[in-house]
Image: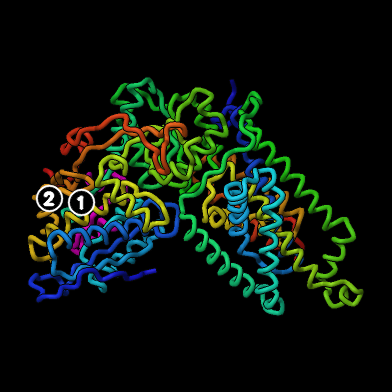
Amino acid sequence: MLAAAAAVAAGAGVAHAQYSDGAIKIGVMNDQSGLYADLTGQGSVWSAKKAIEDFCKATKCHDKIEVVFADHQNKPDVGSNIVRQWYDVDKVDVVVDVPTSSVALAVNNITKEKNKVFLVSGAATSDLTGKACTPNTIHWTYDTWALANGTANAIVKTGGKTWFFLTADYAFGHALERDTAAVVEKAGGKVLGKVRHPFPGQDFSSFLLQAQASKAKIIGLANAGGDTINSIKQAAEFGIVKGGQNLAGLLVFITDVHALGLQTAQGLIFTEAWYWDTTDANRAFAKEFAAANRGNYPTMIHAGVYSAVTHYLKAVHEMKSDADGAAVVAKMKSMPTDDKLFGKGTIRADGRKIHPMYLFEVKSPAESKAPWDYYKLRATIPAEEAFRPLKDGGCPLVK
Amino acid sequence: MFELIGVPPQALFGQLLLGLINGAFYALLSLGLAVIFGLMNVINFTHGAQYMMGAFCAWMLLTYLGIPYWGALVLAPIIVGATGIVIERLFISRLYHLDHLYGLLLTFGLALIIEGMFRREYGSSGLPYSNPLPGGTNLGFMFLPWYRAWVVALSLMVCLATWFMIEKTQLGSYLRAATERPDLVQAFGINVPRMITLTYGFGVGLAALAGVLAAPIYSVNPVMGANLIIVVFAVVVIGGMGSIMGSIVTGFGLGVVEGLTKVFYPEASNTVIFVIMAIVLMLRPQGLFGTPR
């Protein structure tokens, strides 16, 4: 389960930096085998290695940088054990990615206790920069507040005033439902009901029927991956959309759209932090990624891992040390971020990485011109409006 | 309108019907398990993977050969059943003289290998498969998709036909006799090993049929069976290991119980079956329809 991979860029000259045990060790932990394996998994490991490769090309790094990875199976206990072993025995300096909010919250605590660094790309809960924020964690790519803000606002504005939630029954689903309900109510909408389904689920027809009976205009899917795919597939079967109700996928990844097929997914509206077909640099990254990952295109989580690792390497390179996790994170917060995928950005005191978010709509089969040509841009949410205001999060570091 | 424990009766009818439909999957899968266990004494943990292979086989037939759903419904169980026969001849047949536990471990290992291979090839997020029977009818208390009606009808037919074949025909009586006294049956000139091999292939074919039925409504991905198989095993245990009728009735019944739980306390809907299993094991260890061995 615990596999070491690729020692990259072993220095030819004398190591001049003071790294703990002589190397920078990056641990990518995520779902390698379950329902989130395509949207994180080996793709994130590849992205971390790519970031190291590009960084070392640009700066001629003479440091020994290693990547290890592990499968947390979406279980907080499994994830906690791996991370403890990484920190205590394997001398890992930074943990990256970690989808599944319940696992991420556990890793968040351990990282603070051990004074290491935690760069979250996969997990969604906005609590990581709210009441659970720590001086050792940066939440990179997206969060539940940003998703809710982008998608729910757009939908309420176009008339979707009444909502019913289908919520995955764990930390992530609860956070996404809470943040979305807040946005809906603030924008003048109303939440008529909710149902919390076991994670992972298979048959959603019973829950969809309850949603149908609520007569809500919008059925908000506060779940992810295979659960979202199953919900959308079965909603089509039960004629939910034909019956005048609409689905709001609150967290949808490009791999989900691929799995659904455009015929079923067309017209879905959702918020993401990154899409491959926007700039030449993104397209080039996606092409290289696909060649190495069975033809799959990168999700925003993969791009986030690349961006986070790049910035981490810049910070430790300047400090010439990776020993003090909180100091590294403080350094990362003090430097503006800049990389080829996310462009320029900043990191806030609460650990929130700030960049624009994008509201996308899934193309119809006729509009799609090439494989993985799936999204059209509906709106760009500027960086300053994309994330929860600093004062509203309740992060103890901010006071 | 009056309400029943906070739920309008119309919604309740809908949920009951849905439960019955989901029960159709449980019944079909647990039937295959019961046939294999009842006639071969093998606890087939590969069943979930074979269900998944059925769904993938339908996808492959459509994608690579252009064979639509209706063709896959016949072909996929035959193809996957044939792979089952190969597995039985190569691996399982070597374990008949050992304890059940070895068969369980072997089939569990095979399931992990098969799922791993599919994940490596096709990823984890799944493949699209469109619904061959879109649309449905409004029953007044719920919208019944045509496809679900088809699933429940076909599943019921296959279950009853299987029960009839094993319990009421001469072929079935040979099978049952071969389970009790294989040496004696062989002495009457019946090729027992071949019959057992075909039985395994048939059980696997039932799993694959359930997989094809699932493809249009559930996400077709390598772990789709892994999530389901544990529930199905609970169904078999509750019904009584090896009891054909037991697995059918329990499959449908537990689908209904699970459906009702989804209304009254959805958070518990994936544990309720195991609670029932624990209670049944305490009060009637041989299962509801089983006979003590």
Have a look at marks 2 and 1 and say if they share a chain.
yes
Residue placed at 16% from the left, 46% from the top?
A350
Q: Chain of mark 1?
A: A
Q: Is residue A342 above or below residue A29?
A: above
Residues at circles 2 and 1 in contact by the CB criterion of under 8 Å: yes
Q: Nearer the viewer, residue B35 or A386?
A: A386
The mark found on residue A138 in the picture is: 1
Instruction: Indicate the secondary structure of the residue bearing disc 2.
Output: helix
10 Å crowding of disc 1: few (<14), some (14-19), many (20+): many
User: In the rendered structure, which disc, 2 or 1, sits on the residue that comes first in sequence?
Assistant: 1
Q: Residue at x 15, y 48 (%)?
A: A338
Q: Quadrant of the N terminus of chain A?
A: bottom left
Amino acid bearing label 1: Ile
Viewed as shown, does residue B40 lie left or right of A298?
A: right
Q: Is residue A18 left or right of residue B187?
A: left
Q: Residue at x 61, y 28 (%)?
A: B143
Badge 1 marks a residue whose secondary structure is: strand
Determine if the magenta segment contains residue B55: no
Identify the residue at horizontal 58%, vertical 49% (top origin). Answer: B59
Q: Which disc is residue B274 wearing?
A: none
Q: Inspect this view and state whether residue A127 appears.
A: no
Instruction: From the top left corner, tell me how far across and down residue B238 is, in percent.
Output: 66, 56
In the rendered image, which residue does mark 2 sit on? A333
Expressed as whole percent of the image width and height from the top left, the position of residue B12 reads 61, 32
Residue B9 percent across, percent down from the top left: 61, 28
